[in-house]
Image (cartoon, helix red, strand yellow):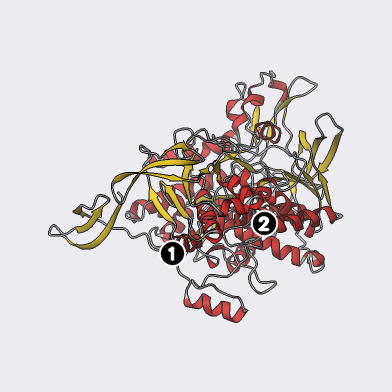
């Protein structure tokens, strides 16, 4: 409901009465039971004091000052900023910037990598545990008040002690703490435990920590089981502690039953080819390639166009006034002069095989040119996006009805002509927020405000009228919206059902629209109409098929997890950045490129990686080569080999279990998730219910 809130007062019925003014000027009062305020973000006094101690400059909102081309660098070299310290942002981009800051740090420290490493010597793994009688230890976590304030942890601990094959139980305030990890190691040794169950939070975030503790005791890490009594219990049953405690007992009983059936699994060392492949030579791809090279990794950059730079070649400056063309020129020159980077233009990836750390790509140079084989350990996808070519509002290339990017080019090439305009209209949400493309393209509003300010600088007397559905200059960009209003730029909102109409009028244009303030139709003449065209995905269907990575229905690539892995694909060793992921500002594309390079560089630098473990295996004696597994695997791993049976490369297998569930003969098994290991949990749960 578009309105202006006047007051919120107690209502006679005990609720809240909100008085507000609607768009047509009507004063209304409505009653509600609850009012939720969407409040802004501000920097704490302690953070300001920390910035002063570090010598880091802050802006007038007390957020860290950063540069659009170096988005995580502060005013002090060697000190980097990410997340909300920079300004308001959501979780995925905070995580992305964290990786970007890590990349910037890794570049600074690249020359010293490995010089201070102390290799932890793990004890040899205890043999013959697969057939040994289970000796299970159970550790229940309070998780501060996350679990302990709802679940009776002491009661759960006492219950665990009664379960079969459990020889030790304990509870801890924070089981994931360093002190508790050391305590668990001592208990495993003293009690001769060969299976461990931790009842705590999510295995997604903490399983690896506890598995490392087992490895430090000579136990195979797959002899560990976790019961999630926080996310799946205390968090969702806060108002019923009694039943939450009973559910925690059920979860622990199921985990103990499965732990008794766990078997050691073997992982083999993974050899990594320490070279990266970057696909796409725009700003994101160039920054990703340079960031990898600065970490001292060889990098091959593949760009299908003749020139590097992508969409950035059409942009003069950022909304902050930074010179994009000079920055791009410097970036390309640095990439061409870096001995660790090989640039392949007018090139295309036409073949792709292998697995994490050991990929092989076939690259075709020129339409019918030579083919190159490139061996590499990681891939960064930075294929960019393009501007929508409007079909609306009488658009025609070369006319006085143009897109925002075309205006950018016109200002660069014919500035004097643009300065003579007397009135300009800008129409937003062209090709977006409609049935065909329901998404907001994020960057169009700031593009309109940027160009409105540029036009006002060229000719302060020029009328600039922005016709919009919603202005979304998010974060600190609101300042530029305020500046535009202060300089006389007019903003008039239109509804989706009543869009503006544009017709030719001599050498100019005539625009009709309904002004939402005056509540009346307007008809005005102008020199030009600028369309805020949507950002649409590049044609990457063939590449997505080659790499076996997913795209959404709009053609943009999809990350593995929006919050936990915002620049990773589900397939390991393949990363994502820039507008291949979705519409972004230049600063956001650069930050995501650094983040992708950080993740890729961390992978290439890790020399202790393994393959195997939780992977699927085929029993060839019962395989009928029916192709069900081949067709159902989302990663395209199974293949029919020369013996006419299905074969699964354990280096490629992601352990998702789809092929296991689909195999009609039941001849595929997923290690660590065998049928008996799954069914024992179900049976144990039902025993408790009955």
Residue at the far front: name it.
Answer: 506
The answer to the question of whether label 1 and label 2 lie on touching residues, with beta carbons closer than 8 A, is no
The first of marks 1 and 2 along the sequence is 2
In-image side of 499 versus 161 (left or right): left
Structural crowding at the residue carrying mark 2, measured as other residues with C-alpha within 10 Å and reported as few (<14), some (14–19) or many (≥20): some
- Please tell me whether residue 512 is drawn above or below residue 120 in the rendered image: above
Residue 670: % across, % down: 64, 35
Residue 263: % across, % down: 65, 43
The structure residue drawn at horizontal position 62% and vertical position 79%, both measured from the top left corner, is 55
Question: Which of the numbered marks, if any, corresponds to residue 48?
Answer: none
Q: Nearer the viewer, residue 590 or 447?
A: 447
Residue 276: % across, % down: 78, 48
Q: Judge whether residue 521 can be spotted in this image.
A: yes
The structure residue drawn at horizontal position 60% and vertical position 57%, both measured from the top left corner, is 318
- Please tell me whether residue 317 is drawn above or below residue 366 in the rendered image: below
- Please tell me whether residue 3 is drawn above or below residue 355 in the rendered image: below
Secondary structure under tag 2 reads: helix
Q: CA distance from mark 1 to mark 2?
A: 26 Å
Secondary structure under tag 1 reads: helix
The structure residue drawn at horizontal position 73% and vertical position 46%, both measured from the top left corner, is 281
Q: Nearer the viewer, residue 505 or 432?
A: 505
Residue wearing tag 1? 486
Structural crowding at the residue carrying mark 1, measured as other residues with C-alpha within 10 Å and reported as few (<14), some (14–19) or many (≥20): few
The quarter holding residue 68 reads: bottom right
Q: Judge whether residue 295 can be spotted in this image.
A: no
Question: Which of the numbered marks, if any, corresponds to residue 324?
Answer: 2
The quarter holding residue 494 reads: top left
- Quadrant where the C terminus sits is top left
Q: Nearer the viewer, residue 236 or 25?
A: 25
């Amino acid at each position: 409901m578009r309105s202006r809130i006047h007051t919120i007062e107690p209502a006679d019925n005990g609720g809240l009465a909100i008085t507000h003014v609607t768009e047509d000027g009507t004063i209304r009062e409505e009653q509600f039971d609850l009012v939720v305020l969407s409040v802004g973000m501000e920097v704490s006094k302690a953070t300001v004091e920390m910035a002063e101690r570090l010598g880091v400059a802050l802006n007038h909102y007390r957020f860290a000052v950063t540069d659009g081309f170096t988005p995580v660098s502060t005013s002090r070299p060697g000190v980097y900023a990410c997340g909300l310290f920079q300004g308001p942002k959501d979780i995925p981009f905070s995580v992305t910037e964290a990786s970007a800051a890590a990349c910037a740090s890794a570049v600074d420290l690249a020359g010293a990598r490995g010089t201070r490493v102390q290799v932890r010597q793990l004890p040899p793994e205890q043999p013959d545990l697969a057939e040994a009688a289970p000796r299970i230890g159970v550790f229940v976590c309070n998780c501060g008040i996350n679990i302990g304030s709802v679940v009776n942890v002491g009661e759960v601990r006492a219950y665990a002690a009664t379960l079969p094959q459990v020889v030790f139980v304990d509870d801890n305030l924070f089981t994931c703490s360093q002190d508790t990890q050391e305590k668990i190691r001592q208990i495993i040794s003293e009690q001769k435990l060969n299976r461990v169950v931790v009842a705590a939070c999510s295995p997604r975030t903490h399983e690896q920590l506890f598995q490392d503790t087992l490895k430090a005791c000579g136990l195979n890490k797959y002899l560990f089981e976790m019961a999630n009594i926080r996310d799946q219990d205390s968090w969702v049953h806060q108002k019923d502690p009694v039943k939450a405690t009973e559910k925690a007992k059920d979860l622990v009983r199921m985990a103990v039953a499965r732990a008794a059936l766990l078997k050691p699994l073997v992982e083999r060392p993974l050899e990594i080819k320490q070279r990266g492949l970057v696909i796409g030579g725009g700003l994101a791809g160039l920054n990703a390639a340079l960031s990898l090279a600065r970490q001292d990794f060889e990098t091959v950059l593949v760009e299908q166009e003749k020139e590097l730079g992508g969409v950035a070649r059409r942009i003069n400056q950022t909304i902050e006034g930074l010179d994009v063309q000079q920055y791009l020129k410097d970036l390309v020159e640095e990439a061409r002069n870096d001995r660790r980077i090989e640039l392949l233009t007018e090139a295309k990836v036409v073949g792709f095989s292998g697995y994490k750390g050991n990929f092989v790509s076939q690259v075709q140079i020129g339409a019918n040119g030579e083919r190159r084989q490139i061996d590499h350990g990681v891939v960064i996808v930075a294929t960019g996006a393009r501007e929508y070519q409007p079909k609306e509002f009488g658009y025609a290339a070369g006319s006085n009805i143009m897109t925002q990017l075309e205006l950018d080019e016109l200002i660069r090439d014919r500035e004097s002509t643009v300065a003579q305009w007397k009135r300009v209209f800008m129409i937003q949400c062209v090709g977006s927020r409609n049935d065909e493309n329901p998404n907001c393209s994020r960057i169009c509003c700031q593009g309109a405000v940027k160009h409105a300010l540029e036009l006002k600088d060229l000719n302060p007397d020029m009328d600039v009228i922005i016709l919009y559905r919603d202005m979304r200059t998010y974060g600190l960009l609101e300042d530029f919206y305020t500046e535009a209003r202060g300089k006389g730029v007019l903003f008039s909102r239109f509804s989706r059902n009543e869009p503006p109409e544009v017709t030719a009028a001599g050498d100019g244009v005539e625009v009709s629209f309904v002004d939402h303030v005056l509540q009346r139709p307007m008809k005005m003449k102008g020199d030009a109409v600028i369309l805020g065209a949507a950002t649409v995905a590049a044609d990457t269907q063939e590449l997505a098929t080659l790499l076996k990575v997913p795209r959404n229905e709009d053609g943009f690539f999809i990350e593995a997890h929006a919050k936990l892995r915002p620049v990773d694909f589900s397939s390991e060793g393949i990363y994502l950045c820039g507008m291949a992921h979705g519409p972004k500002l230049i600063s956001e594309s650069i930050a995501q490129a650094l983040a992708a390079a950080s993740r890729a560089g961390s992978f290439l630098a890790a020399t202790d990686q393994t393959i195997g473990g939780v992977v699927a295996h085929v029993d060839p004696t019962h395989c009928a080569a029916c192709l069900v597994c081949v067709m159902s695997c989302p990663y395209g791993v199974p293949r029919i080999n020369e013996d006419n049976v299905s074969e699964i490369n354990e280096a490629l297998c992601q352990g998702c279990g789809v092929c296991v569930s689909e195999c009609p003969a039941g001849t595929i098994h997923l290690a660590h998730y065998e049928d008996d290991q799954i069914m024992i949990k179900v049976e144990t749960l039902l025993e408790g219910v009955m």
